[in-house]
Image (cartoon, rainbow, N blue to C red):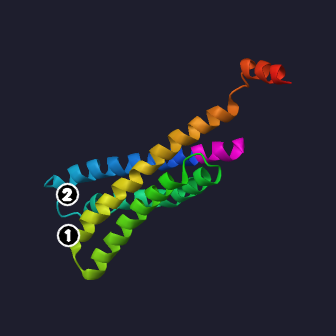
Amino acid sequence: MIQIITQAIGLANVSVYLGYGAIVCFCVFGTLASMATFKDSGVVYWAFHYLPYVLIGLSMPISLYHLFILGRYRIIQKGILKMILVVGMGLLAFALAMAIKGWAVAFYMSLFLAMIAWFGMPFLFRVNLKKFLNFLNSPTDEADENENENKK
């Protein structure tokens, strides 16, 4: 189990770095897109508008894996995990509904909210996985051992 949790923490770190990469891309390419030199560049426009979504989208399967691990080993209460999943998937479904209706502005605004929800998940999952790993690696307290001997 320790190996699974350690691997999950490593994946959580990858997911966090993907989120940081999305922020950096948004800032860098947004700055470049506002400059007169690059205002007609299709690559800069694409990178500014879509690359952050792609990077967060790559972290979604990792977050779903973390939801499974956290629920499987009961690290976080099932109700909290369900709420996290409902919010993330609900916002994505709402964005999809806006895309189907053809409401571009509402689609991008709702997609942005969904990406914010999915962006925050790896941070929450990483903290909980690290605390659980610390719990698994902690030595048994001598007071607990003495208490168990006294009960016999």
Which label is found at residue 141? none
Q: Up-down: is 10 above or below 134? A: below
- Residue pointed to by mark 2: 38
How many numbered badges does the structure rendering display? 2
- Tell me the quadrant of the picture where the C terminus can be found: top right
Q: Tag 2 or tag 1, which sits nearer the N-term?
A: 2
Q: Which residue is mark 1?
A: 105
- Residue furthest left in the image: 36
Count neighbours of disc 1 (C-alpha within 10 A) and say few if under 14, some if 14 to 19, many if 20 or more. few
Seen at 83% across and 21% down, the residue is 149
The stretch in magenta equals: 1-9
- 1 or 2: mark nearer the eye: 1
Query: The disc labelled 1 sits on which kind of residue?
Result: Val
Seen in the picture, residue 98 relative to 129 is either above or below; the reply is: below
Which residue appears at 49% of the width and 59% of the height?
A: 82
Taking the magenta stretch, the answer to whether it contains residue 3 is yes
Nearer to the camera, 103 or 26: 103
Locate residue 131, reporting x and y percent: 57, 35
Q: Inspect this view and state whether residue 48 appears.
A: yes
With 112 as the anchor, is 144 left or right in this view?
Answer: right
